[in-house]
Amino acid sequence: MFIGPCGLTFSHSIARTVQSTPPRFLCKSFYSSAVCLEASSVSNKFYAKSLRLPRTKFPQWTDPLKTEVSLRKKICDDLYRWQWENNKGPLFVLHDGPPYANGDLHMGHALNKILKDIINRYHVLLGRRVHYIPGWDCHGLPIENKALKAIQVNDHRSISPEQIRSLANATAIQAIKSQKDEFRELGIMADWDGTDSTYRTLDHDYEMRQLRIFQKMVERGLIYRHYRPVHYSPSSRSALAEAELVYKDDHVSHSVYVTFDLDLQSHVSSVALQNLVAGQTKVQILVWTTTPWTLTANMGVAVHPDMTYALIRPAERTDEGVSALIVALERLDALSKILGKVEIVAKVQGSELVGARYRPVFASLAPDIASESLAIITSTHVTPDSGTGLVHCAPAHGTEDYNMFREQNLISSTSSIVCHVGEGGLFTNEVANVVGKEAGEALVGQPVLDSGSKSIVGLLKKIGCLLRVERFKHRYPYDWKTDRPVIVTATSQWFANLDDIKEDALKAIETVGFYPQISRNRLESFIKSRSEWCISRQRVWGVPIPSLHHTLTGESYLDSRVLDHILAVLDKNGVAYWWEGPIDEFLPPFLLEVDANSSNWRKGSDTMDVWFDSGSSWSFLPDRKDAQPRADVCLEGSDQHRGWFQSQLLTAVGTAEADKRAIAPYGALLTHGMVLDASGKKMSKSLGNIISPMTIVKGRVGPKQPAYGADTLRLWAATVEYWRDMSIGPKILEQTSESLRRIRNSARFMLGNIGDPTTRAKSSLVPKGHLGLIDRYVMHQLFELEQTALISYAQYNFPKVMSTLANFTNTTLSSLYFDITKDNLYANDLSSSERRSTVTILQHVLNTLVHIIAPVLPHLAEEIYSALHGQPSSEISHESSVFSKPWVPLSSDWHDPTAEQEMVQLLRVRSTVLGLLEQARGRRQLSSSTEAEVDIILPGIRNDLTSLIKREESFLKTLFIVSDVSVIEEGPLGTASLPWLYEDSVPLPGTDGRARVRARPATLAKCPRCWTFTRLHKDALCARCTVVISTPS
């Protein structure tokens, strides 16, 4: 300390100034100033401590790996069980479409489950009992492949079916355990470990329920076995249903133009055709095909009866013996690059060509094999849009060809269908019956989509029938599981007849809600376009189709009586017993009467389509009264219109009682798009752009990525328009994390200013009638926000909820209400009416806000809720959870459009004021807006705005965040002595007048406590702060 003149004591900082200054410069005024400075320093500390700065234990930031994990069990497993036992509202059923149990979760899984959880939590908040049973699809090729890959086996034929089933079962169970843990990391509410609270399609009860559904469809005559062309996947070694195909537009085939010789020796009934070929030594027909490998199964060539065909010859021929070609007249221009210049010898209608015969294309390779000539047939599906106008027909490899041959009675039995393709899409030994022994030996075992097709092209060149080979890009079906091309080939399969139930199915979905609505067209079109469903698969891991086959006659037995006996055996011994048990146990007595020798019987080896597996899942949901659908909602990716949505519907309608209207198993269908990377590309290992949801939640060390936590990922899912394809990437996650931070900080500001529960208990809430305009405006905005949230949650429009919430927190709260109320929150007395009004609003906002965010951000909501009630989040119980009491919306009394209209007018004036202050700030004439005062000069004109400005004069300084606002009548104003002044005007609606607005320096001194320029120069503090300081509280 330093003792100065007159015994004054100074701190070391001031002492150093005194000691370093010559005495002649230490005037009386210095010492006076020093005393004030020293006193000011002491006073400022006292004043700072007297301010009501925000105080809360609610942290600005938390480590999600700690806070979320500590809450997870309570707000997921425990909460689900609690709500099921305690909520008394109506039942709400969200039926979970089962993901494949074959690996870790990807972003599609995360999006899907989070969206479902948002819906479920919303209904829990409404007090409803939520029925949500997560499931897993456990059969099929993806799991088989995963199991075989784990033991480094590439060919399933190298190990026994029993081994495959055992490995696949273990793979599925392990994947389910892993996925359960990962779903918990996402904060998904479910009873994950309950015995009856999840379902697996490999469970005995599930499989038996599925087989009972199958039996009912058999009883209705909907299941039959047929040998016909189906989509077959060589890569999966199984038949596929239409729902298991994806179509690629960039597939390239090697198409061929091939000539067939007309059999001029056969009888020709058409006079026009007789005249056409008269005098010709050799006439050929030209066909075009993108599948050369199907030519060995050629059974006819089709022409359109109403198209005109031309007999042509090369225009510059030198050999009179050159063959003539028949092609469609309309195709000549398109074929000019292949045919060159030609002359038209004659023309004939397609109908005149019908009945003419031609020699099989490979007949010359097998002269020792008797081969009959084949016929040209009629078909209206022939068009002049591509090819040659003559279409090669192979009923074994084309549905149109097969149907056409059946309609024209050209197929007498299944044995009359020519097919040389077997398991795996390989040529069989029977191909030698067409191409001869030598060529046949070379073809057998070759894959038709690869070397087999190339070999056929080589044979065509050898026999001189190949006119041209071209690369042809076109739309082609692929196996959706293996991403490899499929073929169409004839096999014996089990089918479900859809023609008999498709109309009932379409009627059943008339009352179903679709989100988005346009997706209704998608499901309806899939149903309308299908006449049958191939339900059999050539896999070893799946639910068996329990059919019995008599090996001597080839007869298949599958009816209700057979199934009654078989299902009883399986129910007792387990469904896997079908593969393990002896045939004797499965033969009912009435079949033993057909043939008592069990060695003449075999069990069917086909398994059911996995869509039949998952499509049976509706049957375990509770049956509801009054013809209600069993599930209120199903939500899956948009590809499920051709998959699970459809298979559920078809199995439900297919098992409905014939005399009753069929009911869809769901009340509403929601679909979401695909998650893409930040560039809008599909995620794939080859591109290296896969983003794991677990990496987002838990972070990664190398390359480093922060642990954003589940709430950030959930917020992303709730903000994107999920019904379209959406992107995710580092920048998007950063933006989402920032949005979450803003919500958190808004809550923290409010929690810090309302006080703890004990403090709040000492002060009652201010009723609406005593609130100011800004308070009523904020409550009106809050009411509107809550109504938007309730409606949008009910309509599954989560992005609208979150965008409206963001606008409210960022604009109404942070940019306006928080900003203008800080002065009264920090500087006013606790008991002041103005501060109590603000605290009342903040409490209402917090209570409403926590319910709005809870479905999307359950971890943050619980943190806020526990802080609001003075309880550590780690001690949250079900009774003290935000989800423990129904969400009670604000009273409609808070709907106050008048307050909104008036505030909109004042906010326009505020914008003008802020513009003036910004001009002064830009010229460095003020740093804080409280250094300014504002004058509003009203003209003689009166309207609603002028009346409003006068009425709210005392509030305007708060709204503008200036030290004072004066509302004065228009007249002369002195401005000469002002250091600066800026002026503008605002229109008075409904009049031609304008009110002048001017900003100028504050006339009073700065208050050292509240920092507003409202202190009289002679006083230590402003009037407000003087009162607060003198109050004992």
Image (cartoon, rainbow, N blue to C red):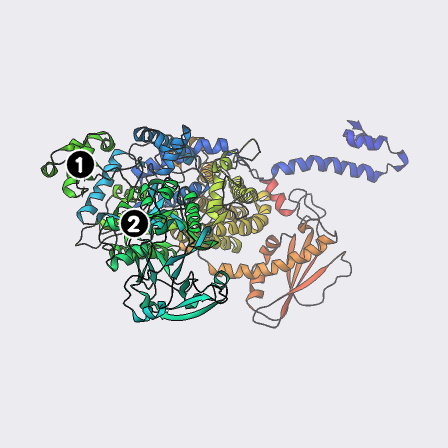
Quarter holding the N terminus is: top right
**Which numbered marker is on residue 56?**
none
Please identify, in this view, whether the residue under mark 1 or under mark 2 is nearer the observer. 2
Vertical order, 686 against 931 (above or below): above
**Pick the front one: 652 or 624:** 652
**Pick the front one: 383 or 759:** 383
Within 10 angstroms of label 1, few (less than 14), some, or many (20 or more) residues?
many
Decide which of tag 1 and tag 2 comes sooner along the chain: 2
Secondary structure found at label 1: helix
Q: Position of residue 145 (x, y in %)?
A: 39, 35
Query: Quadrant location of residue 276?
Result: bottom left
Q: Which residue is mark 1?
A: 566
The residue positioned farthest toward the bottom in the image shown: 992
Q: Is residue 878 visible?
A: no
Q: Position of residue 439 (x, y in %)?
A: 38, 44
Q: Which residue is mark 2?
A: 418
The amino acid sitting under disc 2 is Val
Position of residue 494 in the picture relative to residue 701 (left or right): left
Q: Residue at x 24, y 48 (%)?
A: 415
Secondary structure found at label 2: loop
Query: Quadrant location of residue 1021?
Result: top right
Q: Position of residue 635 (x, y in %)?
A: 37, 47
Q: Position of residue 309 (x, y in %)?
A: 38, 68
Q: Is residue 766 visible?
A: yes
**Pick the front one: 179 or 890:** 179
